[in-house]
Image (tube, grey):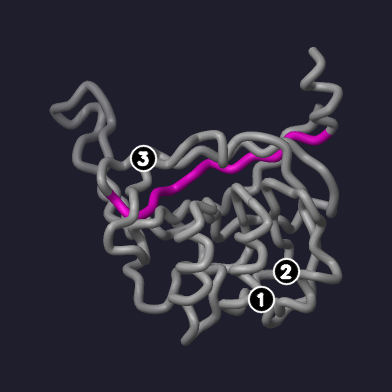
């Protein structure tokens, strides 16, 4: 069994344009009037590898702590797509049918159109993940996000799939249950030969 960490390092990951850069502050240090080290993090909840909640784009959407965990844990398929906009035609031709959790390896340059996102959502997908900073492209964020989130599709963004070959895996990527927030960091891991593992 192999565990593949597909999480980007939090403080060195690319930051979406306009979002604040994450910073850490040490507020206590062992030996300086303290028995422990203690740190505080200042960051956007959408930094690095993270999950989007419906509340991110839907005014009455649920928050990240209300998301069902089963979307983030279970068998998944990784596919490689060329960089650029993912069209509905591309989904029809190359996306696997009956896939509940799908991760897109596009070198950080693959983005959904509104219609292609809706088509994937209409297939009963539980989760869509991408190694891009977002499922949408610059100037077209709202449509793809709403297409997925309004259908209850969980979104993972900012994955690191550089060491992952296309194929079947077991995904474990639950988000931190930040009360009432629109997203949260995740520690995303793929397990290879999960079929053998699942029989143990």
Q: Point out the image quarter for the N terminus.
A: top right
Identify which residue is drawn at 54% across, 68% down.
Answer: 133
Q: Position of residue 30 (x, y in %)?
A: 26, 28
Pointer 2 or 3: first along the chain: 3
Cα separation, mark 3 vs mark 1, equals: 30 Å
Q: Position of residue 47 (x, y in %)?
A: 43, 59
**Dot label at residue 109:** 1
Magenta span: 181-192
Looking at the rendered structure, the secondary structure element under dot 2 is loop
Q: Look at the picture and state if 17 lies above or below 65.
A: below
Crowding around mark 2 (Cα neighbors within 10 Å: few <14, some 14 to 19, many 20+) is some
Identify which residue is drawn at 67% across, 47% down.
Answer: 101
Cα separation, mark 2 vs mark 3, equals: 29 Å
Crowding around mark 1 (Cα neighbors within 10 Å: few <14, some 14 to 19, many 20+) is some
Q: In screen coordinates, is 6 left or right of 178?
A: right
Q: Name the residue under label 3.
A: 66
């Amino acid at each position: 069994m192999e565990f593949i960490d597909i999480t980007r390092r939090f403080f060195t990951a690319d930051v979406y344009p306009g979002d604040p850069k994450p910073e850490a502050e040490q507020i206590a240090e062992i030996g300086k009037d303290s028995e422990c080290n203690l740190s505080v993090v200042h960051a956007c909840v959408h930094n690095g590898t993270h999950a989007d909640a419906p509340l991110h784009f839907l005014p009455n959407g649920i928050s990240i702590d209300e998301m069902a965990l089963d979307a983030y844990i279970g068998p998944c398929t990784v596919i490689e797509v060329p960089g650029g906009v993912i069209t509905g035609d591309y989904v029809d031709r190359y996306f696997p049918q009956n896939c509940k959790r799908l991760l897109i390896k596009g070198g950080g340059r693959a983005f959904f159109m509104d219609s292609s996102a809706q088509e994937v959502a209409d297939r009963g997908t539980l989760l869509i993940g991408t190694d891009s900073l977002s499922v949408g492209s610059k100037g077209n964020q709202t449509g793809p996000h709403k297409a997925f989130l309004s259908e209850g599709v969980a979104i993972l963004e900012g994955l690191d799939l550089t060491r992952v070959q296309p194929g079947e895996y077991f995904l474990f990527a639950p988000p931190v249950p930040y009360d009432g927030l629109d997203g949260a960091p995740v520690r995303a891991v793929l397990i290879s030969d999960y079929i053998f593992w699942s029989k143990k």
